[in-house]
Amino acid sequence: MNKDFKQTSRSGSLAWLLQRISAVILFILLLLHFVTYHFLGKGQAVDYHWVVSKAGNWWFPLLQFAFLLTALYHGLNGVWSVLEDYTSSRSWRLLWYSLLLTVGVVLLFVGTLTIIKLYTLQAA
Amino acid sequence: MAMIDIRVKILRYQPGQDAKPRWQVFAVKVEDESTILDVLNEIHWQHDGTLAYRRSCRSSICGSCAMKVNGRNVLACETPIHRFGTKLKIEPLSGFEIIKDLVVDLDPFFEKLKRIKPYLIVDRPMPDKEFVQSPQQLEQIGESTLCILCAACSAACPSSWPNSDYLGPAALLKAYRFVFDSRDDGADDRLEIVNDKNGVWRCHTIFNCMEACPKKIKITEYLSRLKLKVVENSL
């Protein structure tokens, strides 16, 4: 066991603060999601056709993209926070960070494509 | 008061003799109102004099006898055996190197405590008499001063197990105790020390420390206040 306290250069305060802020935003977005999908639907089944019928509204891509961005940040930042408990070596940390960043970018790309596709599908 | 038969399984480790820790079972007859410490004393005095464990005050104030009993960190001197029944499984605190049997090396624990400067730092002119502190100011730190440094919280913290560099809940609680003390002037210094990857940000509010604390200190709540203070200070 290391008896010396290793002070590292990066603190973590910003990641902690952003995790709290993204949690609050996620909560608000979740409420908006429930209102728009389940309460305004007046008992209609939320299926593919229902989603496509709403996709042309201005708020739809905005809400979906905000959800995608916030959930990705909040989830991946949380995983990174846990991974940091278990990885002390610089190379492992870099590897995990790169992997999470790649996952984030890929999912953001696929998610954004889906939102654009749904929006343009309705517009067409 | 009646005598009962209990089965005690203890994790033993004799340096120079055992390659790794091993379990040993003792069948003991004790009074039903005994504490864990009474049971260990009975084994030490009547069954096996080589059993090593720490004890001192027997009044849950010195913090020497923290150990893991049936998976929970407790003070042996204050914990009655009826809380666990007639089958006891006693281990040393997790996350520390075992010196012998139930005695662990607490040097890293105290080194981390020293790191946060666990003493009053006063930069202002000294008053003629004592420092005046309002009941509200005292209330803010009152409970956190009850810590007896038994290490039960740090040993229960999952963030401490994989990362021996993490300051741990006890040192961070001590940091809180001085940062929020109206008589102290060393807050900036301490906040800089705890504002680190191995400092307060390794706390994931798991609440294990609170559950393990024999003094029932709301450690997680105080660490959350400390985090907010760090953020306020660094903005």
Image: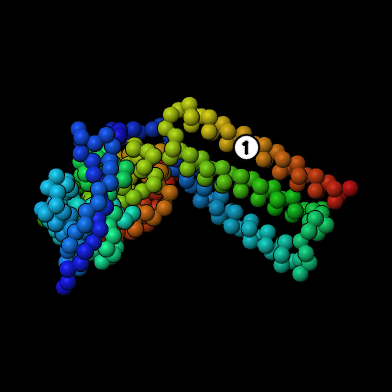
- Quarter of the picture holding the N terminus of chain B: bottom left
Residue A80 in percent (x, y) is at 51, 40
Vertical comparison of A118 with A7: above or below: below
Q: Residue at x 14, y 57 (%)?
A: B42
Q: Residues within 10 Å of mark 1 (few under 14, many from 20)?
A: some
Please state if B137 lies on the left or on the right of B59 as rendered: right
Please report the residue visible at 52 percent of the width from the left and 47 percent of the height from the top: A19
Q: Please determine whether, in this image, residue B59 is positioned above or below residue B183.
A: below
Is residue B199 visible in this depiction of the protein?
no
Q: Residue at x 20, y 52 (%)?
A: B65
- Image mark count: 1
Q: Secondary structure at mark 1?
A: helix
Q: Residue furthest top?
A: A91
Q: On the image, numbered disc 1 is attached to which residue?
A: A103
Residue A71: x percent and y percent?
Answer: 61, 48
Place residue A11 in its image quadrant: top left
Quarter holding residue B137: bottom left
Task: Judge left or right: residue B187 versus residue A84.
Answer: left
Q: Give left or right: position of A25 versus A123.
A: left
